[in-house]
Image (cartoon, grey):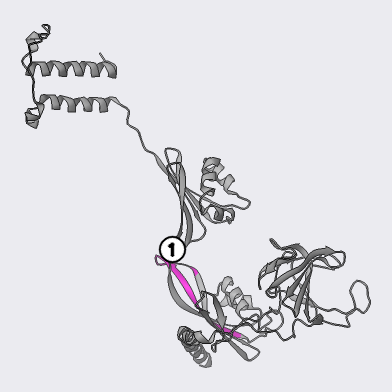
Amino acid sequence: MSFPILHKRVILITGLGLLILQLSGIGSDIESHSEDAKHTINLENLADNQNPVKEALENSELVADTSSTAIQVKSISTTDKVGAGDSLAKIFTRNGYSAKDLHQISATKLGKQLKNIFPGNSITFESTNGQLTKFTYHSSRLESLEFIREDTDFSAAKNIAHPDRVISYKHATIDDSLFLSSQRAGLPDKLTMRLAQIFQWDIDFVLDIRPGDQFFVLYEELYLDGEYIGTGEILAADFINQQNTYSAVTFTNTTGNTDFYTPKGISMRKAFLRAPVEFSRISSSFNLRRRHPLHKTIRPHRGIDYAAPTGTPILAAGDGRIKTASRTNSNGRYIVIQHGEQFVTKYLHLSKFGKNIKSGRKVRQGQIIGYVGSTGWATGPHLHYEFLVNGTHKNPRTVKLPKAEPVAKRELATFRAATRQYALLLNSYKDQITLVTAQ
């Protein structure tokens, strides 16, 4: 016969009462209710192994425990990947988590960084009994944003793993294009782009590259827990173009700015880029006596046309302020940038403007200001680029460009000490390549 839990506890308590009465010697007088009876018992004076009340109480706890249902804790960890067109709202919904969780995470100090999630990056959810306890967005193998539940809110932290950095070398002789030659040499496309950016002020990679040109590059390979995870920064590089050698080393100054300089401390940068689009071809050069392709008349062509696929990024040639970002029938979408008092650059026939690009905004050299298109009077997708000095059009390919600031004199000693090792390693590697080639 079974009893409800409450009945079991009543029976147990009644039994304990009778036991206490028997120990105090008043069990036979239980019905007398004598006011003169003052029998007491001191439970503390009984040894543990002689304490029947204590033992009974402990047994009562055991009875209660065995009569109740144990709570099972269920923890789950799931991983998802950001897909094309995904938003965090979509990802939370398909993984079974609420909009309230997402709102609380977005409200943290690092929540704003989740506005820009990229396809291919992974996301981890951890939950206990259906409640989200931890959310992690892995922006790369080295960086992640972590959000942990604390009562009703979430705390946020940015985690950065520090890989081992190993110095490596690459060399290539260019037979066709910089990209193809780099790929054959095993240099990742990301570093090829960086290499071109370093030397872009001295070499026009659209027109100046010749078969037989060479490059030597000293760079970092990254390893995490012994596993190769990618490349780091270029430390030093030499580019031989048409028998001219250009050398660059990296240096971080006291203000924390990292850039490339010649071994003597002269900045590789110029105040302007030679070309505001990367790896395109010139379809029409600067020519003050050009025959117009649409109107069939002699009209000055006061700029350079860079033919490139629609959507190719267009870069600001130099630091400045946008004077005009508008549209006309002839120019299509176009941008005019004022660079100080002397210089103006113009960009015509854009398919669309870059993010936050409008009149009055400041821009930095290399910033994406728009994308190649064929708006206005254009026969195909290209960028028409003009360069003006004191109001006069100049050929962007041949105009003398002002240089950027060199390493400060007070930092020259630090610069030489910091870059000497890179230069020596690169020169040693070049000597080995030259020796092998000569044999």
Name above or below for residue 86 compared with residue 300.
above
* Residue found farthest to the front: 36
- Which residues are the magenta region? 214-230
Which image quadrant for residue 362? bottom right
Task: Name the residue type under label 1.
Answer: Ala
Residue at image location 32% in from the left, 28% down from the top: 69
Residue at image location 22% in from the left, 27% down from the top: 61
The answer to whether residue 39 is visible is yes
Name above or below for residue 161 compared with residue 1.
below
Q: Is residue 4 left or right of residue 80?
A: left
Q: Which residue is mark 1?
A: 161
The answer to whether residue 217 is visible is no
Q: Using the image as rendered, state which of residue 135 and residue 171 is in the foreground.
A: 135
Residue at image location 60% in from the left, 89% down from the top: 245
Point out the image quarter for the N terminus: top left
| Mark 1: few/some/many CA within 10 Å (<14, 14-19, 20+) | few
Residue 218 highlighted magenta (yes or no) = yes
Residue at image location 91% in from the left, 71% down from the top: 294
| Residue 51 coordinates in the image, percent (x, y) | 9, 27
